[in-house]
Image (spheres, rainbow, N blue to C red):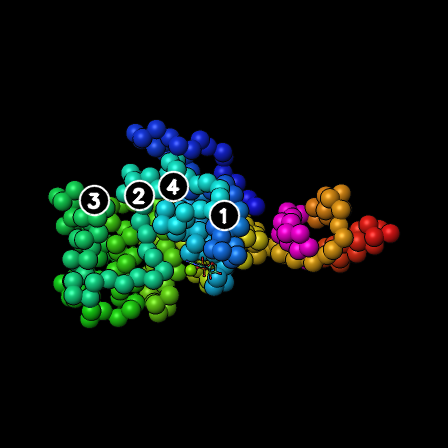
Amino acid sequence: MVAGVAEETKTAAPLEGAAAGTPAIKTVELTKRFGRTVALAGLTMTVPRGEVFGFLGPNGAGKTTAVKLLLGLLKPTSGSASLLGRPIGHLQTRRRIGYLPELFRYQSWLTAREVLALHCELAPLPRSSWKDEIGSAMETVGLAARANDRVGTFSKGMQQRLGLGAALLGEPELVFLDEPTSALDPVGRHDVREIIRGLASRGTAVFLNSHLLSEVEQVCDRVAVVDHGRVIAAGTMEELLRGTVVKVRVTGLTPADRNNLSGFGALDDEGDQLTFTNLEASRVPDLVSASCHRCSSSRG
Ligand SMILES: Nc1ncnc2c1ncn2[C@@H]1O[C@H](COP(=O)(O)OP(=O)(O)O)[C@@H](O)[C@H]1O
Ligand SMILES: [Mg+2]
C-alpha cells in the first residue's frame, strides 16, 4: 500500500551531504513478523522533508514497530527503508534524528540537566554547544525552572516533557514521537502541538505515532491510518474526513472482478477483505450491489 505522494528519489546517497532533496522517510514494503504475528505488513510510504506525518491507529496496530524498524532498533523481516536519503541504521543519520520513545524512563538520580547532557554526549554534540542546547530544550518543553531537580521528583508528565526535550537536542532534521502526550494533561497536549508546529516551521520532519485522532488531526499535514499492520487510509486530514473508508468482505471474486471494483476508488486488497478509501457514502449501495453481482456471476 502506498501512503505517500512525494516524488521518487534515490536512496543510499553518498556519505557527504545527504541531499536536501531526498525525502525524510521512504519505505518500500517494509514488513515485520514476530513468529506468526504480522506486526507491519508491507508499509510503502514517503514522508517529505519538513512534513508532520501522523501514524494513527489502535493499540497493537504496528505503530511502534514501524518506528523501531526505521530507527534500526528492530530488523525488518523484509522490505527496505531510508531516512534522510540513507539506508536505515546509518550511524551518521542517527545523529540527525530525534526520538521520544513510547516507554520512557530516565535515571531517577540524575537532574533533568544531567539527563540532557547525557543525551548530548551520546548524540554526540560538540561540548561547546551543550549549554545552549540544553537551555533551549528545557525552555521549549517548559522545564527551565526544574532543570536542576532530580528526575525522581518529576511527575510522569514532566518526565515525558524531558524525553521530548532530549528528542529536540541538536536541531534534528527528523523527529520520531511515539505517543508523545500519553502522560500529559490537556495543557501539556496543547504545548506538544505547539512544539511540533515549531519544529515544522523550521523545516524539521516529524513522524507522530498516536492512537488519538484528536492528537494528529490538529497538527499533522498528512496522516496514515494503520490497523493490523496495514495502512487502510492515507491523505491529508481533510481528505480522510471527506471520504469514507469502506471495508467489504466478499468471497469468490476473480481478478477481473477485483479490477472492476477498483473503479470505486483506491482499493486495498487483502484476500476476502477489500478496503476502499475515500469512497463517497452515497456510492456504498452501488458498491454492495456490484460486489454481490460479481460474486453471483463468478459463481454462476
Ligand atoms: N517484541 C515483540 N515480540 C512479539 N510481538 C510483538 C513484539 N513487539 C510488538 N509485537 C506485536 O506486534 C503488533 C504491533 O505492536 P506495536 O507495534 O507495539 O503496536 P502499536 O504501537 O500500534 O500499539 C502487536 O500484535 C504486538 O503484540
Ligand atoms: Mg505503540
Decide if residue 175 is on the left or right side of residue 212. left
Q: x, y (%) of residue 183?
A: 34, 67
Report the image quarter containing ligand 2. bottom left
Mark 4 highlights which residue?
A: 88
Q: Is residue 99 visible?
A: yes
Indicate which disc, 3 or 4, sits on the residue closer to the N terminus: 4
Q: Which tag is nearer the camera, tag 1 or tag 3?
A: 1
Question: Secondary structure under badge 3?
Answer: loop
Q: Count the marks: how many? A: 4
Q: Nearer the viewer, residue 47 or 201?
A: 47
Indicate which disc, 2 or 1, sits on the residue closer to the N terminus: 1
Question: Secondary structure under badge 1?
Answer: strand
Mark 1 highlights which residue?
A: 31
Q: Amino acid at mark 2?
A: Arg
The numbered dot on residue 124 is 3
Identify the residue at image location x=25%, y=54%. 166
Q: Residues within 10 Å of mark 2 (few under 14, many from 20)?
A: some
Q: Amino acid at mark 1?
A: Thr
